[in-house]
Amino acid sequence: MAVLTEEMKRVVRAQRLGYVATVSADGHPNVSPKGSVAVWDDNHLVFADIESPHTILNLETNPHTEVNVVDPSVRKGYRFSGVAKILRSGELYWRILDRYKAEGADIRRARAIVVIEVITAAPLVSPCYLTGLTEDEVRALWAEWQRKSSQKMVVDLIPPNDF
């Protein structure tokens, strides 16, 4: 079992959005964004089942999962692999819902809570850092790209025919 470092916890808490990978019964990979990913303790992540029928079905069939949480502005984050347990009742279920509620979440739509025992955790780092860029430089490049791309129309983003 992996121990989540303070830096891992900070990134998860700051981002809250994680991409949860599962495998369907027929063996196909599935990735679904979950905006409720949270740190439960030093060894577990949690997320709420809010309109996640395919993710839940996949985890019921195969509880192995991976969650990627990335800060898009610096292109860094973490990959957490583990085993999921789906809770629909019980003391732990209510304790987790109480924490979500204390943080201001509307828990009325939560159908279940998924608790992931993290087996391995590893950094995710963009290859752009291989060029020697710093986080501040990557952040500035991303901000510039977003500023420029938001000013263009779809036709401006299509390359010319001779591209």
Image (spheres, rainbow, N blue to C red):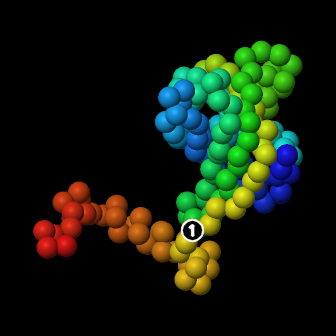
The answer to which quarter of the image holds residue 138 is bottom right
Pick the quarter of the image with the C terminus: bottom left
Name the residue located 79 percent from the left edge and 46 percent from the top edge: 119
Q: Secondary structure at mark 1?
A: loop
The answer to which quarter of the image holds residue 46 is top right
- The number of discs equals 1
Q: Nearer the viewer, residue 18 or 147?
A: 18
Q: Is residue 4 above or below residue 118?
A: below
Q: Is residue 154 visible?
A: yes
Residue 34 location (% of width, % of height): 59, 38
Name the residue located 78 percent from the left edge and 44 percent from the top edge: 118
Q: Is 160 on the left-hand or right-hand side of 62? A: left
Q: Is residue 103 visible?
A: no
Residue 134 location (% of width, % of height): 62, 80
Residue 38 location (% of width, % of height): 72, 41
Q: Nearer the viewer, residue 19 or 119?
A: 119
Q: Is 142 on the left-hand or right-hand side of 48? A: left
Name the residue located 57 percent from the left edge and 68 percent from the top edge: 126
Name the residue located 75 percent from the left edge and 54 percent from the top edge: 121
Residue sticking out furthest to the left: 161
Q: Is residue 97 above or below residue 143?
A: above
Q: Is 51 on the left-hand or right-hand side of 120? A: left
Q: Is residue 142 above or below residue 134?
A: above
Residue ID for mark 1: 126
Q: Is residue 46 above or below residue 14?
A: above
Q: Is 163 on the left-hand or right-hand side of 24? A: left
Residue sticking out furthest to the top: 89
The answer to which quarter of the image holds residue 17 is top right
